[in-house]
Image (cartoon, helix red, strand yellow):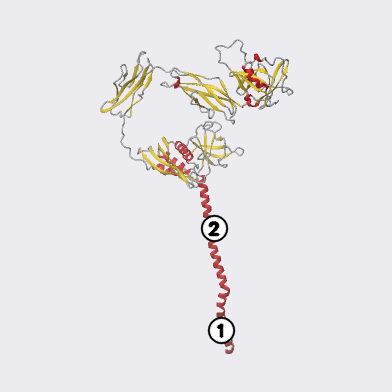
């Protein structure tokens, strides 16, 4: 290439370079500027999105924490929360073999619409293993609670010393938690469980996990449910004696309560505490023994004239290394004596002794210990014997659903009758049955939802003597539907020269036929049919003579002639009761509704009794006529 051509090429290259330098700012401003702005906007939007996504995630986590907190809360009512939490803490302490246990409700704090807290104070004696197991299970439980205070006093320095503990457990219920009637879901055993059984059944599995494994407390025993019957989720295969408990037999109705393990504690086991248990930090030198000598087994007594008193005084908490205990009597009644070595005390009274209080003072001293002298006064009360009262109850009684039941209980006693106290014995009496202010009158209104049947009722009467004596009587309470309100008088008809009254038992759709002299029984009504007329019937029972209009039910009968006071002995002409069950008699379907009066049905006006005159009632038109 010659110089001319080289010059031309260099000129072209220089022109290109200069042109590119002129176009670069134009490209940066017109083309790349919007691209950079868009990138910045995208970066800002991405950052904002990530922030919002983080906030959403934090919100979801917070909601989950709130949900878990509500699920692990105590019941929302403060009284329920404290009572149920106290029961749960008590059961856990017993399960961990705490002794000298004293559990009491503590303070409460109610922050409305936020949360409430309840405290339970526990005072007990245990060892390091028992305390550690209690704290371990306390932390394992899926509950909103904590140990708010723990004080420990060790009483020994060797081995595994006993410790006196005082702790405060604080449980929480957060606002919005579901209502419940227990700390954790609970069921019962429908049948006994032996110590070797590996299968158990609960009355209801509602609320329990549907998948194994999980823990449950059966009484004071912890079991691990390892399998659930696919056809009956209330039938479980279990491993017995878990978490330091011992497999034991359990009776029917024993409590079975879920023990849910808190999230985050499922991989923790009690064996993780082995090092802590093997190197107890609570042992301290045993303080010098302080003896507090006292006299035991010497008690006040009440005896009858002619009876004897025998008891043996014992010396307790005495250092016998110093010397043997010695007993003596001071200021004692004549004839009362005590053996100085054995502590045997004896006194025999005469039949003619004056009933009153007699005293004597037992003295405890010790050989080689002149400073020891312990006194205890004994009081022997001599009084006439108190016989138990006698109670009189009917063999059975009838209570009708929806109606008041009243029973007067009769009793006799050798003391003032006004001092007798009446009560119901046992825990299975009908709810609401009580003795009223009248003392010996038993009252109850049977709810219409109560199940009819026969129920044994035990009545107890206690006198005011010292010591108080009691007697118990039993009656069978027959609770039944109000058949009387559903049994109507539907008519009468002459048959074979005798009037027959027709009734309709609507409850059982039965139609009994009764004649004069028959008995009608419906619920608590038990009366003899003494007259059948055109538009009424009359019946007689212990209360007197009753009249019932055509179409009315037995509850609508009217007492027209009250019974006179019963004579000392029954008259020879008294009618012998012939029971006829109105609920089981059957009447023909074609029986007429009313009868035609027969001759002699009406009495002359001069011969009418007060009951006859009262029953011009009979001339009123019937309220209804049914068959």
Residue 582 in view of the camera: no
Residue under the image location 48 percent in, 26 percent down: 437
Residue 90 found in image quarter: top left
Report whether residue 273 is seen: yes
Q: Secondary structure at mark 1?
A: helix
Q: Name the outermost residue toward the front.
A: 606
Q: Nearer the viewer, residue 265 or 610?
A: 610
| Mark sitting on residue 53 | 2
Across the whole image, how many numbered discs are drawn on residues? 2
Rendered view: 56 above or below 499: below
Residue 191, disc: none
Q: Position of residue 623 (x, y in %)?
A: 67, 26
Quadrant where the C terminus sits is top right
Q: How much space separates mark 2 and mark 1, taking CA atoms?
A: 56 Å
Residue 22 vertical position relative to residue 352 in the rendered view, above or below: below
| Residue 157 place in picture, x, y as percent | 35, 39
Disc 2: CA contacts within 10 A as few (<14), some (14-19) or many (>=20)? few
Question: Furthest residue to the right?
Answer: 590
Could you say which is closer to the camera, residue 563 or residue 522?
A: 563
Local secondary structure at mark 2 = helix
Task: Residue 438 in the image: state x and y as whole percent.
Answer: 49, 24
- Of marks 2 and 1, the one in the foreground: 2
- Sequence order check: which comes first, mark 2 or mark 1? 1
């Amino acid at each position: 290439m010659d110089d001319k051509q080289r010059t031309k090429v260099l000129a072209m290259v220089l022109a290109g370079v200069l042109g590119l330098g002129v176009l670069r700012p134009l490209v940066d401003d017109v083309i790349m500027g919007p691209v950079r702005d868009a990138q910045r906007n995208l970066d800002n939007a991405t950052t904002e999105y990530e922030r919002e996504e983080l906030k959403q995630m934090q919100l979801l986590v917070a909601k989950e924490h709130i949900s878990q907190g509500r699920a692990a809360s105590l019941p929302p009512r403060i009284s329920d929360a404290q009572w149920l939490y106290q029961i749960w803490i008590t059961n856990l302490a017993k399960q961990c073999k705490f002794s000298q246990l004293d559990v009491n409700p503590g303070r409460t704090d109610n922050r409305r619409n936020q949360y409430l807290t309840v405290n339970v104070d526990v005072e007990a004696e245990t060892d390091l293993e028992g305390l550690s197991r209690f704290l371990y299970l306390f932390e394992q439980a899926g509950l909103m609670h904590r140990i708010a205070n723990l004080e420990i006093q060790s009483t020994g320095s060797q081995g595994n010393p006993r410790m006196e503990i005082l702790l405060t457990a604080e449980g929480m219920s957060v606002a919005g938690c579901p209502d419940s009637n227990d700390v954790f879901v609970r069921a019962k055993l429908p049948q006994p469980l032996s110590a070797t059984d590996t299968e158990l059944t609960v009355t209801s599995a509602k609320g329990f996990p549907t998948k194994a494994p999980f823990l449950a407390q059966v009484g004071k025993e912890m079991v691990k449910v390892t399998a659930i019957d696919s056809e009956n989720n209330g039938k479980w295969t279990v491993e017995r004696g878990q978490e330091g408990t011992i497999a034991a037999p359990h009776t029917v109705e024993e409590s079975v309560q879920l023990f849910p393990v808190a999230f985050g504690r499922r991989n923790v086991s009690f064996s993780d505490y082995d090092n802590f248990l093997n190197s107890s930090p609570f042992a301290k030198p045993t303080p010098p023994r302080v003896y507090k000598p006292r006299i035991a087994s010497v008690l006040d007594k009440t005896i009858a004239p002619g009876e004897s008193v025998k008891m043996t005084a014992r010396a307790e908490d005495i250092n016998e290394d110093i010397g043997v205990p010695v007993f003596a009597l001071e200021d004692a009644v004549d004839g009362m004596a005590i053996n100085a070595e054995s502590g045997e005390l004896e006194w025999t009274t005469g039949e003619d002794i004056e009933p009153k209080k007699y005293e004597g003072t037992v003295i405890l001293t010790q050989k080689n210990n002149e400073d020891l002298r312990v006194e205890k006064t004994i009081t022997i009360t001599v009084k006439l014997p108190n016989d138990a009262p006698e109670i009189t109850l009917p063999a059975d009684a009838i209570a009708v659903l929806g109606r008041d039941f009243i029973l007067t209980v009769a009793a006799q006693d050798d003391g003032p009758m006004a001092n007798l106290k009446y009560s119901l014995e046992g825990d299975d009496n009908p709810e609401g049955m009580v003795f009223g202010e009248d003392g010996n009158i038993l009252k109850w209104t049977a709810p219409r939802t109560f199940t009819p049947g026969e129920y044994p009722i035990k009545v107890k009467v206690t006198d005011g003597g010292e010591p108080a004596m009691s007697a118990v009587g039993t009656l069978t309470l027959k609770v039944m539907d109000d058949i009387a309100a559903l049994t109507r008088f539907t008519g009468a008809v002459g048959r074979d020269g005798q009037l027959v009254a027709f009734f309709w038992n609507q409850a059982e759709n039965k139609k009994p036929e009764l004649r004069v002299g028959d008995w009608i029984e419906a619920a608590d009504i038990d009366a003899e049919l003494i007259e059948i007329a055109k538009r009424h019937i009359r019946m007689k029972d212990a209360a007197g003579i009753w009249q019932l209009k055509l179409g009315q039910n037995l509850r609508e009968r009217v007492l027209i002639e009250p019974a006179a006071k019963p004579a000392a002995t029954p008259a020879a002409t008294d009618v012998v009761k012939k029971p006829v069950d109105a609920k089981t008699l059957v009447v023909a379907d074609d029986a007429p509704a009313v009868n035609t009066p027969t001759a002699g049905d009406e009495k002359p006006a001069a011969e009418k009794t007060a009951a006859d005159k009262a029953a011009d009632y009979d001339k009123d038109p019937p309220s209804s006529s049914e068959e």
